[in-house]
Amino acid sequence: MTRALHLSDQAFDEVNVVLLAGVDALAQRRRQRLGEEVREALREALIEAAADDLGDAIDEMAAQVQSRSIDPYSATETLVETFRRSRR
C-alpha cells in the first residue's frame, strides 16, 4: 500500500509540473500578445502625432521624392528628425 501511495504521489507531482508549465506558457503567450497590441497602438498614436505636427512638411517631402530630389528613406529620416526636434 505504501508503495502504491508513493507512486500515486509521484504521478500527481509529475502531472502538477506539466500543468504548471502549461499555465506558464499560456501566461507568456498572453503577455507577448498584449505587448504586440500595445506596440501597435503606440505605432498608430505616434503616426497620428507626427502627421499632426509635421502637417504640410509631409506633402512637401512627398513632392521632393516624386521629383527624385530625395529618396523615400532619406525623406523619412528627415521627417522623423524634424518630428523629434519638435517634441524636445
Image: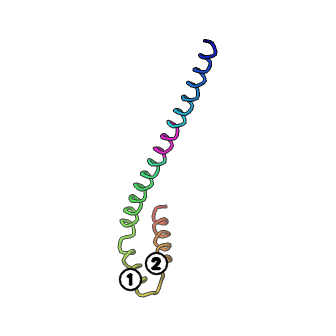
Q: Residue at x 55, y 36 (%)?
A: 21
Front disc: 1 or 2: 2
Lower position in the chain sequence, tag 1 or tag 2:
1
Q: Is residue 31 above or below residue 42?
A: above
User: Residue at 51% across / 43% down in the picture?
Assistant: 28
Queried whether the magenta region covers residue 56, the answer comes back as no
Left or right of 63 on screen, residue 8: right
- Percent x, y for residue 3? 64, 16
What residue does disc 2 label? Answer: 72
Identify which amino acid the numbered label 1 is placed on. Answer: Ala
The residue that label 1 is drawn on is 63
Is-magenta flag for residue 28? yes
Mark 1 and mark 2: Cα distance apart in space = 10 Å
Q: Residue 2, how many percent across, how many down?
A: 63, 12
Q: Amino acid at mark 2?
A: Pro
Q: Which mark is residue 15?
A: none
- Mark 1 burial class by Cα count in 10 Å: few <14, some 14-19, many 20+: few
